[in-house]
Image (spheres, grey):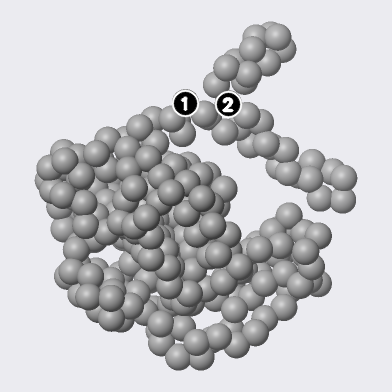
Amino acid sequence: MKNRIKSFLSRNGLVIHRKKAGQVYNCEFADLSLQSRKLAFLELSIIHEITVNGWSQLVAVGAGGPETADFLERFIIKYDLNSLLIDGDEKSLKEKVTRLRSANCTNIKVQQAWLSDQEGSSEVFYFNSSDTVLAGYTSIDKNSFLNTARSLGLTHLVSSSQVQTVKLSSLILEKDISRISLLIIDAEGLDISILKDLLSTQILPSIIVVEFLAYSVEELLDLTSMLSSQNYIVYPDISDVIFIKNSLS
């Protein structure tokens, strides 16, 4: 039986062990076949948008986790997509742009900005040590950041500083963007509020990818209900949910 399990894992996924103080406190199986289906679904939607509706703009908010950053950059490079990359972390933004421009992507614009559903002064939280596994992790959502810090036993390394925040709706208006083909949000606890702010302008992206790990089932169902009423179909994933305007189906 053990050999069969090992064979299945080697073909279909990875087992992720999370440790604290040398002890495994969580074990999670990542099904690579599910990830492949998700990326195939997303790529087909992008191809449909390019060929049928005509590509307008990719808007990416936040750094994105390793998996999100990987497939996003892969698609930008493969199709040389018109893209606006928004991130409050200037270092992360520069590294992203360097990777993409080294791959001869010519249609990239960047904006260093901290996004929220409110404009004004706010705290941004981060770890004050480069030795942690989440050294580049930042968030304006205090509760979300502290929950992550507690789960990793890193509350003693939490620091914060003041930044100015802007709303995505204001930034889109400033950039004179009237249509968005693909919107990806990874804002560490502010994803849904940032998305709702944009939708209040009646700009409805053709494809939306939102990370939902920081949200309850009720909050996710509320978002799904709201977007379903706007003729979106839903593709749930392990850490993200993808919404596609019904015209793509």
Seen in the picture, residue 233 relative to 177 is either above or below; the reply is above
Could you tell me residue 48's position as x and y percent? Answer: 19, 40
Instruction: Tell me, for residue 240, which label it has, or none.
Output: none
Which is nearer the N-term, disc 1 or disc 2? 2
Side of 160 where 163 appears, left or right: left
Where does residue 140 sit, x and y in percent of width and height?
55, 76
Query: Vertically, is 178 above or below 217?
Result: below
Query: In which quarter of the view is residue 16 placed?
Result: top right
C-beta proximity under 8 Å, tags 1 and 2: yes
Question: Which residue is pictured at 66% across the width and 31% down the height?
Answer: 15
Which residue is painted at 52% across and 73% down in the image? 88
In terms of depth relative to the viewer, which is nearer, 15 or 26? Answer: 15
Please indicate, yes or no, whether residue 184 appears anywhere in the rendered image.
Answer: yes
Question: In which quadrant is the C terminus drawn?
Answer: top left
- Disc 2 residue type? Gly
What residue does disc 1 label?
Answer: 33
Residue furthest toward the right?
22
Mark 2, residue position:
13
Please identify the residue farthest to the bottom as the structure is shown.
Answer: 120
Is disc 2 placed on a helix, strand or loop? strand
Left or right, 127 with reference to 190: right
Label 1 and label 2: CA atoms lie apart by 7 Å
Other-residue count near label 1 (Cα within 10 Å), few / some / many at <14 / 14–19 / ≥20: few
Q: Quadrant of residue 133?
A: bottom right
Q: Is residue 239 visible?
A: no
On-image quarter of the N terminus? top right
